[in-house]
Amino acid sequence: MYFDTAEGPVFRPPSEAHSFILRVTIGCSHNRCTYCNMYRTVRFRTRGMDEIIAQVERAKPYQQQIRKVFLADGNALILETSRLLEILNLLTSTFPRLQRVSCYAGPKDILRKTPEELRQLQAAGLKLVYYGMESGDDAVLQHVCKGVDAAQSIEAGQKIIAAGIKLSMMIILGLGGKVGSSQHAVNTAKAVSAIRPNMLSALTLMMYRGSELREEYERGEFELLSPAEIMQECYAIIENLRLPPDCRCIFRSNHISNYTAFAATLPQDQVRLLREIEAARLKLEALTEWDPYNNVEQ
């Protein structure tokens, strides 16, 4: 559900398809990741409570139906904790059947919050955070201008888990290109193992118009992985995961960017998942032709 006419595009995770989308910020405060063009057409700003209350008021006729709320846009945690608590309290008091509130969160915004602030947000209703770590490799993170290094990326994820907030984490297959693929895979696996997210999603790199990485690719300075090489990289990440037996991490690769969809619970299904990834790799390797523009926005 969406009850807003504010500027700019609206994005949400697939699992928030039936949520009330409440835009508490417009755009992305970082907006410098070289692989992303999601918010390039809009200037970032935070929204006042008057705008936020107006959206909630427009949703009131559906208050008995609203059970999930997603705080958009790109990184709601940039707001002061006091403002976020005010918003969460407003939602709790308005929607009697509300079960959870979720949001995207950038690593720098997570790191700015104290452990106590994050626990307060969890207690007030923030139950799920979507975090695009993308890679656990320092060189890759620096190249794509993520704004943090691997150690900070890990710390951000661990802070969410420690606060009792569920963590849905995204990584991007192929983000290191051919040159950085091996290190991207190994170090991303190390980072995921250190964080132990509740949910892990693997996306495949897309070359979007308006992104700096797309321009690198078109200049011949960045080489995309073939579909079979993407499977090889995915295999290396899963193979190098070291999650404890009592961990239950739901793994999915069902994003539209992916060549093959996988579903597993890790580490319980790790061996089975590796077999499926290898089977997909062999199938894709048998392709006689591969158009790299399958993953380049036309």
Image (tube, rainbow, N blue to C red):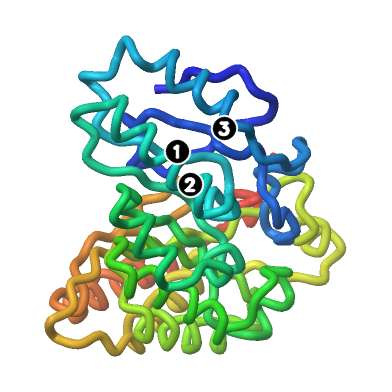
Which x, y percent locates residue 4?
Answer: 55, 19
Residue labelled with disc 2: 84
The crowding category of the residue bearing disc 3, from other C-alpha atoms within 10 Å (few below 14, some 14 to 19, many at least 20), is some
Which x, y percent locates residue 186?
Answer: 47, 88
Pointer 1 or 3: first along the chain:
3
Whether residue 69 can be seen here: yes
The crowding category of the residue bearing disc 2, from other C-alpha atoms within 10 Å (few below 14, some 14 to 19, many at least 20), is many
Residue drawn at (32%, 57%), measured in percent from left and top? 122
Residue 10 image label: 3
**Where, quadrant-wise, is the C terminus in this rendering?**
top right
Q: Is residue 204 above or below residue 189?
A: above
Residue 229 image label: none
In the shown orientation, is residue 222 left or right of residue 50?
right
Residue drawn at (69%, 52%), measured in percent from left and top? 29
**Amino acid type, callout 1:** Ile
Q: Marks 1 and 3, Cα distance to the nearest angstrom?
A: 19 Å
Which x, y percent locates residue 139?
Answer: 68, 84
Q: Is residue 187 above or below residue 176?
A: below
Secondary structure under badge 2?
helix
Residue labelled with disc 1: 87
Which x, y percent locates residue 175?
Answer: 60, 70
**Where, quadrant-wise, is the N terminus in this rendering?**
top left
Q: Nearer the viewer, residue 89 or 294?
A: 89
Q: Nearer the viewer, mark 2 or mark 3?
A: 2
Q: Marks 1 and 2, Cα distance to the nearest angstrom?
A: 5 Å
- Do residues under tags 1 and 2 come within 8 Å of each other at their CB atoms? yes
